[in-house]
Image: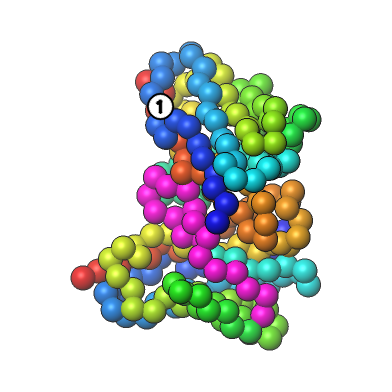
């Protein structure tokens, strides 16, 4: 399982764009990159998943360079409700029995 | 998306008693489920992999006799914390992977007094 490294914490203000970068130097060919969001006393919630280049959905964008050794989660115009811990995971999506190992995550604090 | 439901959301128990936490997949069948533990301000730590119809696989350092896992059906896995002690107080989360990603239960806050 590829190990991931993220900043421990980030601060932002409402309305700003936030970019959280994750390093995964030993990502394997069949691994996908997935980001989760976790609020206090709740289970993680899926945000976005990608393999290469750029993926965008209604809540975020995911940028993956050609070498795939890192990825960046981009949250446009954050609000106070985006204050949470964000986890980057790397795993094979077709191995549904495979366990997922969480890194330390990034605690995002959005201020008014 | 797929739904994973845990019960109870929180529980308080006395030292020495046992507590059972249920994890259900509501709209899919899960041959495999995962149990995590999370302490305050820390990340999720995988405890064990629950396999339907067979024994669970525990991560290194997790006591299998203390954390009993039963995966008796394709929609239900249970975690029983036996002879609970205050140090077992934590947030327990289950998960399943019905598709390309994983879905997590809402978690169970266990407090042992």
User: In this orientation, which residue lies closer to the viewer: A110 or B23?
Assistant: B23
Residue B4 sits above or below residue A94 on the image: above
What stretch of residues is rendered in magenta?
Answer: A36-52
Is there any visible trace of residue B57 in the rendered image? no
Chain letter for mark 1? B
Q: Say which residue label 1 marks.
A: B11
Assign the N terminus of chain B to one quadrant of the image.
Answer: bottom right
User: In this orientation, which residue lies closer to the viewer: A97 or B1?
Assistant: B1
Assign the C terminus of chain B to one quadrant of the image.
Answer: top left
Residue found at the very far front of the displayed protein: B27
Residue found at the very far top of the displayed protein: B16
Q: Residue at x 61, y 76 (%)?
A: A70
Q: x%, y% of residue B62? A: 64, 33
Residue B68 sits above or below residue A9 on the image: above
A7 with respect to B69 (left or right) = left
Residue A104 sits above or below residue B25 on the image: below
Is residue A40 highlighted in magenta? yes
Residue B81 sits above or below residue A19 on the image: above
Q: x%, y% of residue A104? A: 52, 57
Task: Indicate the quadrant where residue A102 lies.
Answer: bottom right
Q: x%, y% of residue B54? A: 78, 30
User: In this orientation, which residue lies closer to the viewer: A90 or A49?
Assistant: A49
Q: Crowding at label 1, few (<14), some or many (≥20) Cα neighbours within 10 Å?
A: some
Q: Residue at x 70, y 27 (%)?
A: B72
Task: Indicate the quadrant where residue A59 lies.
Answer: bottom left
Q: Residue at x 68, y 86 (%)?
A: A66
Q: Residue at x 39, y 79 (%)?
A: A76
Task: Indicate the quadrant where residue A17 lies.
Answer: bottom left
């Amino acid at each position: 399982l590829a190990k991931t490294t993220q900043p421990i914490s980030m601060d932002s203000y409402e309305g700003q764009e936030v970019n959280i970068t994750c390093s995964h130097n030993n990502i394997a060919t069949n691994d996908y990159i997935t980001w989760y969001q976790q609020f206090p006393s709740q289970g993680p919630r899926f945000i976005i998943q990608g393999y290469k280049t750029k993926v965008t959905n209604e809540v975020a964008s995911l940028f993956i360079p050609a070498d795939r050794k890192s990825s960046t989660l981009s949250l446009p115009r954050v609000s106070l409700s985006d204050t949470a811990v964000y986890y980057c995971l790397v795993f094979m999506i077709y191995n549904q029995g495979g366990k997922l190992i969480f890194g330390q995550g990034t605690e995002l604090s959005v201020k008014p | 998306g797929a739904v994973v439901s845990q019960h109870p959301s929180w529980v308080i128990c006395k030292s020495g008693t046992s507590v059972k936490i249920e994890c259900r997949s509501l709209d899919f069948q899960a041959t495999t489920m995962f149990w995590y533990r999370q302490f305050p301000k820390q990340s999720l730590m995988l405890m064990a992999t629950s396999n339907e119809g067979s024994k669970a696989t525990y991560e290194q350092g997790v006591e299998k006799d203390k954390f009993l896992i039963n995966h008796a059906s394709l929609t239900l896995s249970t975690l029983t914390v036996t002879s609970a002690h205050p140090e077992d107080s934590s947030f327990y989360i289950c998960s399943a992977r019905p598709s390309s990603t994983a879905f997590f239960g809402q978690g169970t806050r266990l407090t042992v007094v």
